Image (cartoon, grey):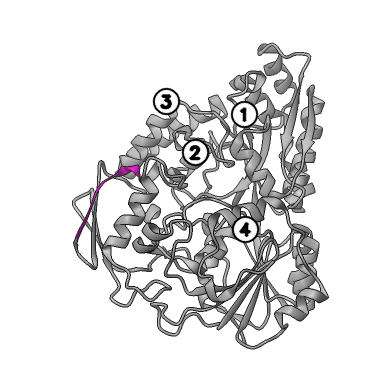
Amino acid sequence: MTDHPSKLLVPRRSVLKTAGVAGVTTLAGPLLIGHVGAGEPGHLRFGLSTYPPSLDPWTNAGTGAATVKLQMFRGLLGYDGDGNIRHELADDWSVEGDKTYVFKIRDNAVFQDGSSVTSADVKASYEAMTADESTAYLKVALGVIESIETPDEKTVRMTLSEPSASFIYLVASFFSFIVSKASLESDPENPIGAGPYKITNLERGTRIDMEAFDGFYKEGLPKSQKLSFIAYKDENLRVAALEAGDVDIIEYVPWQSMDFIASNEELVLDTTDGPFMYLLFNTEKEGPLQDPKVRNAIGYAVKREDVMAAAFFGRGNPLNGMPVPESSPYYNAELANHWSYDPERAKALLAEAGYSDGFDVTLLSTAQYGMHKDTAEVCQQHLQAVGINVTLNLPDWATRVDLGNQGQYDIAVMGTAGQYNDPDALANFVDGRRGASFVRSYGFSDDKMNELLDAGRAELDEAKRKAIYDEWQARALELAPIVGINWRSQGYATQKNVQGFQNIPGFLTFYSGSVIETAENV
């Protein structure tokens, strides 16, 4: 089914949520090639790993959705190809004291309906994100904003309730897009953004076609006049489409295909380490997983090298603690090597917790991504070796997200990256005050961990922050709200004639959709 392009600016949230969860069969092969127009100059074709479950501007619906949304919406700030914060709707910003941020909006910034972006739109967007009824991913984090003033149409002053070392990263996040105040008031299910592309055609579950927005505020951009997102749930079909020239870029290059792509003179592989795999737990459900000893036992039971060999062809590194990169000034070598592979210790901890005979659990993952499925299968084998009987649940990605948000699991496999290169980003994975999310253990919240996260965020002195995050890591390892598995190599691949696209390094790899505006096939 295709929505009428002349009436479509942004697909309605409810339609997209329904479409994604319905699991509509993805098209691939000759039918798709003929429809897209392979090799058409000025037409960039991007192979997604999944059709977006939602295009709501402020919710977390995965990388594929974020990549599409970055074409429709922009925030005050964003990231360039090297991972540096750059200006987007704001062409200047400054800090007054340690709690007030002033943003100047570009004079030429306009929404896709032609209306100017004003300070009133910024205020309305942030107020909608932080409203009591909001489901925005950054709702709690943005609660640090005490007041928003609009002294004129192009100036926004945000004053925080306390200093925040991470606030500017929240402003640059792709979960804090600015949308038209008028569209929020007249049709809140169809918000209008100021991104470089407008949707012209939508085939739910399959593809999204776009064309360049001629009012985009960056002169000469976007480079490609047309942009198509085509969903290939099967990762082998996604690689085959790239090899055949049916698409110009693909995300989530499967690890078993990386060597092949790297050796193909017609293709370019671009990888970075930064994302990581980990286990989540339903700590609200009464049972063994409410006990930190059991969760730690699971951490000792899994042989991470086996996961890496099976799921990532050896690309990456074991993650034996909380996901703080070795390159970070907040890295602690002693705390980073907490969960060595020690099945006997795992059995001892289970016995201490009263489960010497083991127990039964369900393990939620997805068959849509090989890395998730293979990680789940290896974890299943190792957990069963210490007496934990595991039944796998491997639905498609959209269903896995939905089940995770509802807490319909005992243990779950997850893979993601921090939103920014600061330990405060780890709050997204352990801070239960932020509400239910498929990236966090269901029902987990610890006052002491939350207190330390708040202290680290408010402290601007690096040495003092280091001490805070050392204490936080120790507490996190004691309680094991998540169990790290491994760092993984994350890849995009392109045709060799594609210019202007790059994989943003580290945690920010999932922001790479922000540089599609400079990409073109030449």
Badge 4 or badge 2: first in the primary sequence? 4
Q: Is residue 361 above or below residue 47?
A: above
The quarter of the picture where the C terminus appears is: bottom right
- For the residues labelled 4 and 2, the Cα–Cα distance comes to 37 Å
Residue at 27% of width from left, 61% of height from top?
Answer: 120
Badge 4 or badge 3: first in the primary sequence? 4
Q: Secondary structure at mark 4?
A: loop
Badge 2 or badge 3: first in the primary sequence? 2
Residue at 28% of width from left, 76% of height from top?
Answer: 107
- For the residues labelled 4 and 3, the Cα–Cα distance comes to 34 Å
Badge 1 or badge 3: first in the primary sequence? 1
Q: Estimate how packed mark 1 is, as few (under 14), some (14 to 19) or many (20 or more) residues with alpha carbons within 10 Å.
A: many
Residue 336 in the image: state x and y as whole percent.
Answer: 56, 37
Residue tagged by mark 1?
A: 282
Q: Estimate how packed mark 2 is, as few (under 14), some (14 to 19) or many (20 or more) residues with alpha carbons within 10 Å.
A: some
Q: Is residue 516 above or below residue 235?
A: below
- What secondary structure is the magenta-colored segment mainly? strand
Foreground: disc 1 or disc 3: 1
Residue tagged by mark 4?
A: 52
Foreground: disc 4 or disc 3: 4
Badges 1 and 4: C-beta atoms under 8 Å apart?
no
**Toward the viewer: 341 or 253?**
253
Residue 450 in the image: state x and y as whole percent.
Answer: 41, 31
Q: Which mark is residue 447?
A: 3
Instruction: Give the residue type that dot 2 points to.
Output: Asn
Q: Secondary structure at mark 2?
A: loop
- For the residues labelled 2 and 3, the Cα–Cα distance comes to 23 Å
**Toward the viewer: 468 or 47?**
47
Residue tagged by mark 2?
A: 332
